[in-house]
Amino acid sequence: MSADVSVVTKTERRAVPARTAVKPGVIFVLEDDPDILRLIQHHLKLANFEVVGFGSSAGMLEQAARTQPLLFILDIMLPGESGLDVCRRVRQSHKLEMTPVMFLTAKGEESDRVAGLELGADDYVVKPFSPRELVARIRAVLRRTQRPEKPAVIKVGALEINGEAMSISVNGQLVSTTPTEYRLLEYLASHVGRVFTRDQLLDAVWRDSHFVTLRSIDVFVRRLREKIEPDPERPVYLKTVRGVGYRFDRSADTAA
């Protein structure tokens, strides 16, 4: 245990109650270890973030729907509902689906990280962790997920990407996407016809996130194809350039 948490006594070890009044723009932290929760809260408050901690998921998403937090930080191994289940509910919520999610967990295997990605995580931090790095990653996630200053609508065939609403629709029907899926598609669609390597996409969309691998790009592209392509096996928008990477194709315009 680091010096930051060694001063915490047993009588002080408790999570912030789920009904604590919060201000807009807070970070919600779901962590059942009171020492770790206090450590996270301490360092985020030093970084001028408002923080509310939860020892379990009970009542958290209901409060989040009213508060609209900046970010969720979720442990995975929890009593009752797991962090993965919570993330799944966030992505299925109309009010919360675009809220960034970061996992902070002891589960560090590749299969665990991929599972987190496939559920829509924006970052994945493995315990033990550096509080300073955690703060830096939070700021990076918030930078990546902020809305563009000059929103635009990109329309190709039946696909429409609305920068102001940060929404994607196909044939006029809204498609549910995670913030990272949205950023990846918007970036490719903003450079129609240009071929990007996986490394270039990692740098442009994820920047300094260390947990994302080249395989992660393929996971996100596959998920996007399942959501926007008429036939994901024969994509018309997100094309694979064999041996290089991916490009966004405008040929759907002529087919529409």
Image: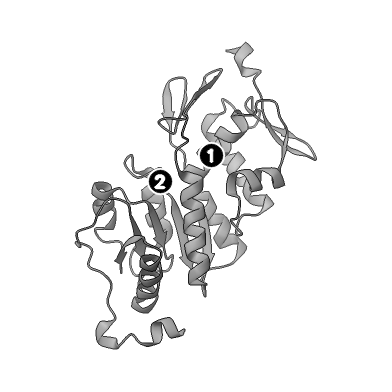
Q: Nearer the viewer, residue 157 or 184?
A: 184
Give the image location of residue 175, x and y in percent.
Answer: 44, 32
Q: Looking at the image, which residue is at 39% across and 87% down?
A: 6
- Numbered mark located on residue 183 in the image: 1
Give the Cα distance between marks 2 and 1: 15 Å
Give the image location of residue 176, x and y in percent.
Answer: 43, 36
Type of amino acid at the residue the image marks with label 1: Arg
Type of amino acid at the residue the image marks with label 2: Arg
Judge depth for marks 2 and 1 and give the one in front.
Answer: 1
Q: Looking at the image, which residue is at 27% across and 77% down?
A: 14
Give the image location of residue 30, x and y in percent.
Answer: 35, 64
Query: With 212 as the anchor, is 98 left or right in this view?
Result: left
Disc 2, SS: helix
Q: Is residue 122 visible?
A: no
Looking at the image, residue 29 lies above or below residue 198? below
Which scheme is used to colour this image of the protein?
one colour
Query: With 237 as the anchor, is 59 left or right in this view?
Result: left
Give the image location of residue 42, x and y in percent.
Answer: 36, 72
Disc 1, SS: helix
Q: Looking at the image, which residue is at 29% across and 53% down?
A: 61
Mark 1: give few (<14), some (14-19) or many (20+) Cα within 10 Å: many
Looking at the image, residue 174 lies above or below residue 40? above
Q: Which residue is mark 2?
A: 91
Of pointers 2 and 1, the one earlier in the residue sequence: 2
